[in-house]
Image: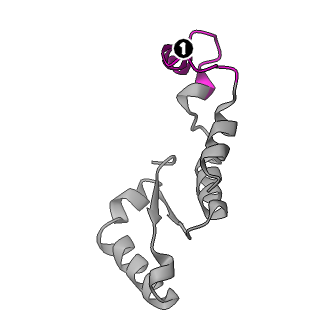
Amino acid sequence: MLNVAIVTTMWSKVGKKDGIDREEELKKEVWHNMLEDGCGIERFEDTPESAWRIVLNIMKNPGVSLLIQEEKTGDTTAGRYLAGTKRPVSNSLLKKIRKSFQW
């Protein structure tokens, strides 16, 4: 579960204390097994910076890699998919992700 994060939302809709209290309740009553297995908890705060913080925190976990990171040859799952969609394979995945987060 090191590459899994429970992401909470709506922090701008509740008071900070109420949000923290509810988060603690969910940790104890609902998420406890996932947390024991290494799952993380992140707060999405309705900003691109918050989204990137979440993504980067998940990527920091040692021993966890994405399929695209493991496939280093030209014949990859991602490459076959992109070839089928007629999109160029030369653009990096990270550039595409960053572009999609620009509102």
Taking depth in this image into account, of 72 and 61 the one nearest to the observer is 72
Taking depth in this image into account, of 41 and 77 the one nearest to the observer is 77
Q: Residue at x 48, y 89 (%)?
A: 15
Is 40 rendered above or below residue 18? above
In what quadrant of the picture does the C terminus appear? bottom right
User: Would you say residue 81 sits in the magenta stretch?
Assistant: yes
Q: Residue furthest left?
A: 29
From the viewer's perspective, is 3 left or right of 89? left
Is 103 rendered above or below residue 16? above
Is 90 rendered above or below residue 14? above
Q: Position of residue 67 (x, y in %)?
A: 54, 27
Q: Residue at x 51, y 80 (%)?
A: 12
Taking depth in this image into account, of 22 and 44 the one nearest to the observer is 44
Write down the residue under mark 1.
83
Q: Residue at x 30, y 68 (%)?
A: 30
The residue range painted magenta reads 69-90
